[in-house]
Image (cartoon, grey):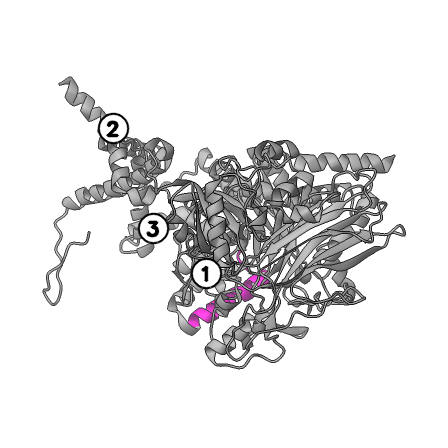
Amino acid sequence: MIKSSLTALGTTVLMMAFPAAGQDTGNATTETLSGAYTGKAYSPYAKRSFPERPLWGDSHVHTDLSMDAGLFGTRLSPREAYRFARGEEVVSSTGQAVRLSRPLDWLVVADHSDGMGLFNDLAAGKPELLAYEQAAGWNKGLAAGGQSAVAAALDLIGTFSQGNIDPEMMALYAPGSKLYKNIWEEVVSDAEDFNDPGTFTALIGFEWTSLIKGNNMHRVVIMRDGPVRARQVVPYTTQAPMGSPDPRDLWKYLTNYEEKTDGEVLAIAHNGNLSNGIMFPLEAQWNGTALDETYVTQRDKWEPLYEATQIKGDGEAHPFLSPDDEFADYETWDIGNLDVSEAKTDAMLAGEYAREALKRGLVIESRLGTNPYKFGLIGATDSHTSLATAEEDNFFGKHSGAEPSAERMMHPFMQNENGTIMGWQQVASGLAAIWAIENTREAIFDAMQRKEVYGTTGPRMSLRMFGGWEYTEQDLNSRMPAVVGYEKGTPMGGSLRVKPENAKAPSFMVYALRDPIGANLDRIQIVKGWLEVDGETREQVYNIAWSGERKLRRDGKLPAVGNTVDVANANWTNTIGAADLGAVWTDPDFDPGQKAFYYARVLEIPTPRWSTYDAFRFGVDVPKGAPTSTQERAYSSPIWYDPAP
Amino acid sequence: MKHVVMRLLREPLLHFFAVAGLIFLFFVAVDDTGELPADVIIISPERIDQLAAQYSAIWNKSPTPDELNALINEDIREEVYYREALALDLDKNDAIVRRRLRQKMEFLFDSGAVLQEPAAGELEAYLASNENKYQHASRLAFEQIYLGTSPDSDNVTQSLRSLRSSPVTDLSGLRERSYLPAQLGLSSLAAVNSTFGQGFYERLEEFSPETWEGPVDSAYGVHLVRIVSSEPVRMPNLDEIREDVLRDWQTEKAKVLREQDYAARREHFTIEIRRRDNTEITESQ
C-alpha cells in the first residue's frame, strides 16, 4: 500500500517534470502518425511529426569567462565558441587556426558560475577590481607577460585554493553584485545573438561546480528559455553565503527558477568517475544524510540526463564492476578524485559509473518508490578552450595549455603523490545527439527532457532504438522503420508500454548508420541491467548486430572485427565493418517480474587515437601506455521496464 | 510653421538630447555635495541606507550596529581622502579616473541613443542595404531510394524509367535496405550534407523538381532522388524579422550618433598636435 502510493507520487512528480513531452513537441503517437502516413510512398512533408535526423551539439563548453580556463590561457570568449561551433574558422588561444569538419547544430556555453568573469577582468584591469590590492598585483603581473604572468597565475591559483582571496572582491563575482549580474546579462545576450532558430541553437546555461574535498559533483544547468526569463536570475554558485555545494540546494534554485520565471530548466551531472563514490549514492549522500523521498524525487525531476563520456574519462562502465564486458575498460580515469587529492579504492567505483547507477536506481526505486537515476545518456567535451573539439584528428585538448604541440602528450595533466595523469590520457570525447523535431531551444530541451538523446565519443553515427512488444524483422526492413518504431512502441529514453497479456518478452528495434565521413561500424550491443528477487542487480551485454560473417561463440562473445590502423601514418580504411547495422532483438532471458533497463552501445571499427595523429604530425613517439587505436562508440539512452508501472 | 514643429518633434536627435538632458538633470539633482562648504562632511540618512543596502547585497544580511559603524567610518575616510585628493588635483592625469569619466559620458549618451525609433522607410532601407545578413539559405525537401553501393547500371536506368512512368510504384523491389531517412522535409545544405555526406545537397540542386532523378552518390552509396519541394534563397519581408532589424538598426544608429556627438564636442576644441618630427597627423575615423 505504502509502496504503491509512493509509486503514484513518483509518477506524479515525473509527469510534472515532463509537461512538455506529450504536448508541445508533437511527440509521435499512433494517432498523429497514422494520420500523417497513409502507408503509401508519398507523405506530407510540411508537417513533420517526428524527428528525421539527430541534432548534434556540445552541452558543455567553457570559455574565457571560466576562471580555470582563463588561468590556463584561454582568451576566446563565448562569441568565438559559438562561431566555431557553427562551423567558422577561428584562431585558438595559442594562435592556431582551427575549424570543425562540419558545423554543430547547437551549443551550450556552460561556464563555471563561481568567479565567472573574474579572470577576464583581472587581465583587462577593470577599475572596480583594481581597487583591491590583490587584484592590482595580479593585474600588473599578467600585464607584464612572460614569467611574471606565469608567476601571477600561479599565485592566483595558490591564493584561491587556500581560500585566501579577499572575500569582498570575490563577492563582486557572486550573486548579489551588480557586476556579476552584468556578466550574466552579457552571457545571455551573446547566446541570443547567435541563436538562430532552425539553423543553430544557442541554449543558455552555466556550470554549478560542486566540489567536496576534491570529489566532483559538477552539474551543467540548461534553460529552455530565452533572455527574458534567463535575466530574471543569476547562476547558482557553490560558495557560501549565496551558494552551496549540496545538490539539494541546487534543486531548490531550479525550483525557484521555474516558479519565478514560469520557465523550464534541467541539470546534467558529469564525471562521476572523479567523485570518489559520491555521484550516485545508494544509501546516503556525500554528507551522510540518508537518501529520502525528497532526494529521489527531486533528482529524478531535475536531472533527466547524465554526461557519460567527456575529455576527463569515459564513465559508461568500469571493468571492476563489469568484468564480463570486454569493452568496459574504455578511456578509464580511475586514479582518484578531480584533483587526485584522494586515491581511488574499488569500493568507490559503484557510486561513479553510469551503468551501475542505472542498476542502483532500480534498487532505490523498489525501496523509496522513485528511481533517482532514471537518466538518459549523452557525451560532451567539457573543453576549456571555447572549442568543441571531439574528433581524434582535430583535438584541441582540455585547456589552452593542452592545445596541439609536440610536447602536450607528455605533460602531466595532473600529478601528485597519489598518481599521475599524463597529457595523452585526455579523451577526445564526446558529443550529444538529440532527436528533436526542429532546431530550436524549445525542441532540443524537450527532447532532453524526454531523454530521446544519445551520446558518442565524438563521431556522428546515427542511432535509433525503439522498445515494444511486437516489432518484427519486416518493420526494420520497411522503407521508413522510424514510423513503425514510434507506432508500435517507445523511442530511447522512454518506458515500455504495459505488457500485453499474450506477450512473452519485449523486442527492441535498433539500427545505426556510420558517420557519413567516419569509420564503419563493428557491432551493436544491448546492455541490460535488472533487479533480482533477492534485491541484487545483474547485468548482461548482448551482441545483436555485427558486420561480416562472424559467428557468435557459445558464451555470446563475438570475434574481434579486425584492425586496419596504420600507426606510422595515422591512417585506416573502411575495408572492414559495415556502413549500417540493424536488428530486431527479443530479450531471451526476460522475466516479467523483474525491473530492468536496456540501452544500446554501438562500436566503430578501430581508428587512430588522437595521440597517434599527434605522434604522426609532430614526428614524436606514441607515448608508452597509450593505445594506438580506439573503438569509438555511441551510448543510447535506456528504455525501462517496470512490472508494475 | 506647424510642420516645422512637428518635424522637430519627430527628430530623433532631439529625443535623445532631451532624455540625456533629463538624466543629466537627475544626476545634478541627486548630487547634493556641491552646495556644501568644502570643510563640512554630512553623512545623510539616505547615504546610511545606501551603505546598509550595499552591504546586504553582498553579504545577504543586514549589517550589525558595529558593522554599520565601521561602514560609515570607512565612508567618511573615503570622503576625506577624496576631497583632499581633489584639492591636490590628484584626479588630473590619472588613467583610471579618466577612463571612468569617459565611460560615464558615453553611458549618458548611449542611454539616450538606444531609444531611437526609425522614421518611415528607414528600416526598409536598412534591410535593403544589408540583405546578406538576413536572407534565408535555400532549402530542399526530397525523397530518396537507396540502390546499394555499386548497383548494376542497367538496373538503375530501369528503375528510373519505371519510377518516372508511374508515380506510385511499389518501391520495395527496387531499393536496398537502408537506415537513411527515406524522405527529408525542407532542409538546408548543412542539414542534408550532415546526413548524406559532403556534396550531396549540391547535386540535388541541379535536379528538376517532381521527377525522379539520379543516380547520385552519397557517403553510403547510390540513390535515386525526387525533389518534392524547394525554397530558393529567400529574403524575408520586414515583418518577419522586424525585431532583429530594429535591434541592429538601433545599434548602428547609436554608433553613428555617438560619433556625431563626439564630433560635435570635439568641435569646441582647438587641437594642436606637436610631433617632434613635424609629420602630418591624420584624423582617425
Residue A487 quadrant = top right
- The local secondary structure at tag 2 comes to loop
Whether A6 is drawn above or below A366: the answer is above
The picture places residue A170, in percent across and down from the top left corner, at 52, 53
Q: Is residue A210 visible?
A: no
| Three-letter amino acid code at the position of disc 1 | Ser
Q: Quadrant of the N terminus of chain A?
A: top right
Q: Is residue A580 left or right of residue B124?
A: right
Assess whether mark 3 and mark 2 are in contact (beta carbons under 8 angstroms): no
Which quadrant, please, contains the C terminus of chain A?
A: top right
Give the letter of the chain under mark 1: A
Judging depth in this view, the residue of A254 and B270 nearest the camera is A254
Q: Report the disc number at residue B120.
A: 2
Q: Residue at x 64, y 67 (%)?
A: A331
x and y, in percent, of residue A467 in the image: 71, 46
Measure the C-alpha gap from mark 2 to mark 3. Answer: 54 Å
**Residue A194 is one of the magenta-drawn residues:** no
- The answer to whether residue A155 is magenta is yes
Q: Nearer the viewer, residue A232 or A12?
A: A12
Which span is picked out in magenta? A148-167
Instruction: Write down the chain letter for disc 2.
Output: B
Q: Nearer the viewer, residue A625 or A467?
A: A467
- Identify the residue at horizontal 52%, vertical 75% (top origin): A570
Q: Residues within 10 Å of mark 2 (few under 14, many from 20)?
A: few
Tell me the distance, in whole angstroms, between the alpha carbons under discs 2 and 1: 45 Å
For mark 1, give the secondary structure: loop
Q: Nearer the viewer, mark 1 or mark 3?
A: 1
- Label disc, if present, on residue A363 of the rendered structure: none
Residue position marked by numbered label 3 in the rendering: B84
Looking at the picture, which amino acid does disc 3 mark? Glu
Q: Which residue is mark 1?
A: A101
Decide: few, some or many residues near mark 3? Use Cα within 10 Å; few <14, some 14-19, many ≥20.
few
